[in-house]
Amino acid sequence: MKQRGFRFILPVLLFGCGLFLPVWGQAGDGRPAQALAASPEEASGAASGVPGAAWIISVKGDISPSLAAFVRREIKKAQEGGAGALVFEIDTFGGRVDSALQITSNILSIRDIPTIAWINNSAGSMGVSWSAGALIALSCGDIYMSPGTSIGAAAPVTVGPSGETEATGEKTVAAVRSQMAALAERNGHPVGIALAMVDLDVELWECKVNGGSRVLTKEDMERLERDPGLTVERGAVICPQGKLLSLTAGEAAAYGLASGIVDSQEALFQAAGLSGVPVLRGPGAADSLVALLTSGPVQIRLIIVGLVMIFLELQSPGFGFFGVTAIIAFLLVFGSNALLGTVASLEMLLFLIGLGLLAVEIFILPGFGVVGVSGILLIGVSLVLSMQDFVFPSADWEWRLLGRNIIIVALSIFASVAGIAVIILMGPRLRMFDPLTLKTSITGTAGGSDDGDDYALLPGKTGLAVTTLRPSGKARIEGRVYDVETEGAFAENGVPVRVSKVLGSRIVVEVIES
């Protein structure tokens, strides 16, 4: 019973590392992972409302893949429930570009339902819609802001090795700038404001065109000044060149970006012409769990657990706890990513083929060569693809996301190899690994003696390995076949070996160097 208990110590410890160690990691873009749990008010919201009711969908915290999946799911529910309007309550400093683009794409796909961005300043909120939050706000038909809130500073950034934010390349800035301008143009928001929030080279002016107030970029203003049919009066510079535009609620309303300033949900409903009891929707415990499982540090731990458990299962007879633990670990990896919409049949097929090649290399082919390496590479590729919704990157942010995913998987594989090496070297010395090695000799005609009395005479004897030693196997010594084991080293079939010691029924051999 005591020996059986030792058998489960290592898997439990390793699996616990994957789930229960504190996570100081990233949510995907170098920012600290933030909790996505719903507020009590949101958590108590009805799952569906009467047809025509307004749905208030919370977009708070870091813009991450799990938040994008939540918004996509709630939009679908609202459409199926006959929502009369969709209000996106935004409170965020930003997040991942790909997740923000997914959210804007889902909002733009909404037909025949008004969309409203509400930058709220409730208790416990930050009252901001910056970076990716501004992109999401511009994708809505109307924008309402509470007093004390702000919007802007939407230039894409990346996190450098030192942890400090750095500006991205012109290609990414151009892509986000075009998207911001397209969103503003589609929904009737001032295009110049959208551009100034993204591009440091944009200079934004307040001016009057034929007596009407306008907010224009310097280039657009100069173009209109050359039109003889227009009267253009220059006003103040809203945003000079070299700075990103951020607007308070009052400024956003004055420049025509915000449709109004509201200080409560009731005021919002009155200003936007909404009625009825709203359906409040916010991320819950399940969304928080998915966000945790898909974070980089936890993914690394789960992959390490899965790979090490696969190795231990392949080395042990039958199918047991090691195999079950490996299945659970990879189910958590692929399952959590599948909930984000990044796992399809391709990833699963590559993973299964990789496992098959690895098993062939271990059980059938001697040594470790092309087949085993190919298996590991296919497993790695499948894990990388499971963390992203594209195969071949095209935009700069996709290349950065690919690099991040490759680093996660590479670190996991290297750590797994190191862990397996430690197990190989230390396994024979630890009782918890006794089930992984064969320790009884073959008696009778198959080899070994019937009573085992000749074991004491074996030290110093030489022979040949008749199976691959991994590190346990069989060797023919003085005409008889014995179950033997090395002290952690692998040896191929046919290599000469020498018995170094006998410990009870354990015969320990060493390879004779030629």
Image (spheres, helix red, strand yellow):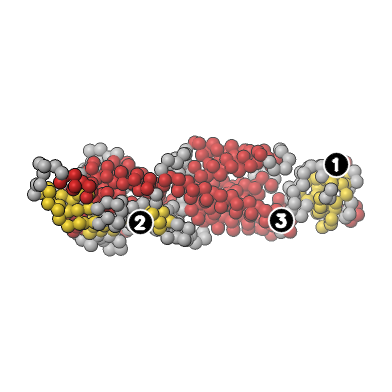
Name the residue tied to disc 3.
425
Residue position marked by numbered label 2 in the rendering: 61
Give residue 446's mark. Answer: 1
Q: In this orientation, does residue 277 appear? A: no
Give the secondary structure at mark 3: helix
Circles 1 and 3: CB atoms closer than 8 Å: no
Nearest to N terminus: mark 1 or mark 2: 2
Residue 303 in percent (x, y) is at 55, 50
Residue at 56%, 55% in the rendered image: 15
Residue 99 as seen in the image, left or right of residue 229: right
Q: Quadrant of the image for the N terminus? A: bottom right
Q: Amino acid at mark 1?
A: Ala
Circle 1 or circle 3, nearest the eye: 3
User: In the image, what residue type sits under mark 2?
Assistant: Gly
Q: Residues within 10 Å of mark 1 (few under 14, many from 20)?
A: few
Horizontal and vertical percent position of residue 354: 59, 39
In three-dimensional space, the C-alpha distance between marks 3 and 2, rounded to whole angstroms, equals: 46 Å
Q: Earlier in the sequence, mark 1 or mark 3?
A: 3
Q: 321 or 134, which is in the foreground?
A: 134
Identified at 73% across, 40% down, the residue is: 366
Please give the name of the residue rendered at 43% of the width and 56% of the height, measured from the top-left corner.
Answer: 159
Q: Secondary structure at mark 1?
A: helix
Q: Is residue 249 left or right of residue 376?
A: left
Indicate which disc, 3 or 2, sits on the residue closer to the N terminus: 2
Residue 35 visible in image: yes
Foreground label between 1 and 2: 2
Q: Is residue 5 left or right of residue 40?
A: right
